[in-house]
Amino acid sequence: MWLGVVEWTLGERERFVWRDGQVVPYRTEPLTAPVNYGCLPGTLNPADAAEVDAVWLGEALPVGTETRLTPSGLLHLADGDHKVIFGEAQEAHLAALLAWFPPERGAKLLDAAAAQTWLAELGLAELALTELGAADGIA
């Protein structure tokens, strides 16, 4: 399970960002978000030197929503700025997610095992479990 925080709500243009343990206003985007978008706090993706990005499929989640979930997939991008996918994979949601990225980014969907493997390759599996345990009082 991974701790995730929503920074941008499905259907909204107002985008927020995770900084110093809180979600703060970032910018207004020209288009609405096709999925809920955010990050896995306490992680680092070397592709963009920021937290690992995450998307939540399904209904709109308010900015600041925290989840502790197991990934359902991985949006693999050619530049390495992959997105961990959470939620039930319905065709319409996945199509909207893929359409969000231009062809040159080489977006493709991979399964839950690929997400866990990629996170482990970043050295994050133990960090996530330790943080989750501490947050839930089971560490």
Image (cartoon, rainbow, N blue to C red):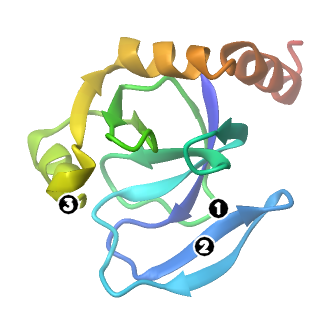
Amino acid at dot 3: Pro
Amino acid at dot 2: Phe
- Image coords of residue 21 (percent x, y): 84, 56
Choose top left, top right, bottom left or bottom right for residue 76. Answer: top left
Residue 64: which disc? 1
Q: Quadrant of the N terminus?
A: top right
Nearer to the camera, 107 or 30: 107
Q: What element carries label 1?
A: loop
Nearer to the camera, 125 or 50: 50
Separation (CA) of disc 3 from disc 1 = 28 Å
Nearer to the camera, 8 or 79: 79
Q: In which quarter of the image is the C terminus?
A: top right
Discs 3, 1 touching: Cβ within 8 Å: no
Amino acid at dot 1: Gly
Q: Is mark 2 on a helix, strand or loop?
A: strand
Residue denoted by label 3: 102
Mark 2 or mark 3: which comes first in sequence?
A: 2
